[in-house]
Amino acid sequence: MGSISSSGHVFVHHVNYIWLRRVDDDRNGLNILPSYTDYFNLNTATLSLNTAALWIGGAIAGLTYGQVTDIIGRRYALFWAAVATFLSVILQTAAQNTAMFVIARILVGYGTSASTLTGPTYVAETLPYNWRAWGLGVLNDCYYVGGLIAAGVTYRTATYSSTWAWRVPSLVQGIFSILCIAILPFVPESPRWLAYAGRTKEALVVIAQTHANGDTSNPIVLAQYKEIIDTIEYERNVGETLSLKQMVKTPVARKRVSLAISAAVISTISGNVIASYYLGTMLDNAGITDTTTQLQINIILNAWCLCCALVGTYYADILGRRPTAIISTSLLTVFLFIIGALTKVYGTSTNKSGVYGTVAAIFLFQGAYSFGWTPLLYLYPPEVLNYPIRANGMGLFTFVLNGVALLIVFSFPFAQEAMGWKIYMINGAWDVLEVGLIWKYWVETRGKTLEEIDEIFEGTKHSDAPDLERIVQGETQPEESISDSIEVLASRKSV
């Protein structure tokens, strides 16, 4: 089921944009480079500011770009996000002082977060339900593809004696903005956005392109189309709007938003931000202080995390979203405690076995995180948010994600100086609470279209079209259920 060509364009477009996000986000390489820290004369406070500036811009995007995405459409929103990021990258590459660099980082953060707010919304609304886990999961898995590129480029430029040692890695980011802008004309608009805008015939064509190689008479296409039209009509009839207050208007809406935010918070405070952005500090604590060795470890770590993330993406559709999150969080908690214990015992030791053990624990921790949270981070939130609150809900999700990351990234160096290995133990303790939260409150969304997920929250589905999974498995014949109404639906000029 699905069109290789149309869905492939959607897939490739967002892979490229997440490559940009990862190349932009990979602060490990620059933070390790002496030419970078020396040029800006960085101390603990300014290092934190340079690193955290990204999330300042990201938080601002979260508060403002959801409405933009609803108004101008998913594709145009992605285009302007890519343009903003490209211009910001040029400014960062040309930075002459800390203030200029920080301002550029804030603007880069705005552009990339605007794209990662809109991107998952678009992919979730465009891909067939049984491609959604792979489309959204691999979208964020390619974070590590960008990480490999960034780590490799930084490793090569580390030998430069000039400021190009850090300017080249900054400049490389712009390549992926250009790729995204180039691909955009070849991908369709979200069929759900089109349907909500009254462009129902276009919506049917896009569904056919992404589900059945353009066959608008395909039973699965017709069933999905009817689900979308019926659900949008229901939501309008009960007074649901695209306003910000819709997110808190009803208990069901509040539950949906709470689940989306929980993914942002848990994925950020589990310890991965520490490992991702201060790998150099962690390796220093483990007794590995050579810059070249740290850069080599950074490259290998990104490759390892990519493999784990792809395995997790595969199992997200087999085990389900909730079990995958529980397994991942449980494992990373154990490994974080081990990192703390090994750092305490061997952090100032010359014992090579202890140092290697600490590095191995860091790899296992990052692997456990990547298995679950890398694919789930942008998969679960757009699934639990229904159309009227999806873009704004993803905006709030992005704001919380960046705000919490900003707090942790800015405070970690000071906490590390004050508490050392104990910070890992404290982090592990609240990770235990996260497992309980997921177990008790998360709902399972595997195997359902976005409209069918409504039944989990509201107790009923808002369309009489049969579930798509039942059609695929041959349990029902959709022609009998929807043939009488499909001509009317297809000819509607508005919904």
Image (cartoon, rainbow, N blue to C red):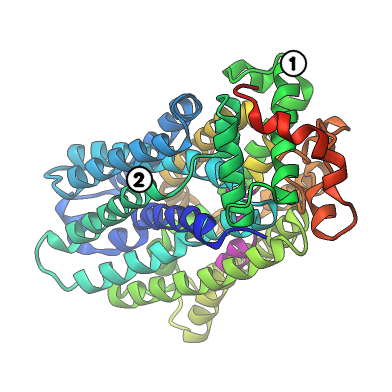
**Screen quadrant of the C terminus:** top right
Q: Which residue is mark 2?
A: 48
Amino acid tagged 1: Asn
Position of 454 relative to 124 (above/below): above
The disc placed on residue 416 is none
150 to the left or right of 228: left
Residue 470, position in %: x, y? 85, 53
Q: Position of residue 137 (x, y in %)?
A: 59, 57
Compared to 375, does 436 lie above or below?
above
Quadrant assignment, res 278: bottom left
Assign a secondary structure to mark 2: helix
Q: Closest to the observer: 330 or 11?
A: 11
Magenta-tinted stretch: 366-379
Q: Is residue 425 visible?
A: no
374, 488: nearer the viewer: 488
Left or right of 333: which side holds 26? left
x and y, in percent, of residue 164 in the image:
13, 61
Whether the magenta-drawn stretch holds residue 448 is answered as no
The quadrant holding residue 383 is top right
Task: Tell me the residue that label 1 is attached to.
Answer: 237
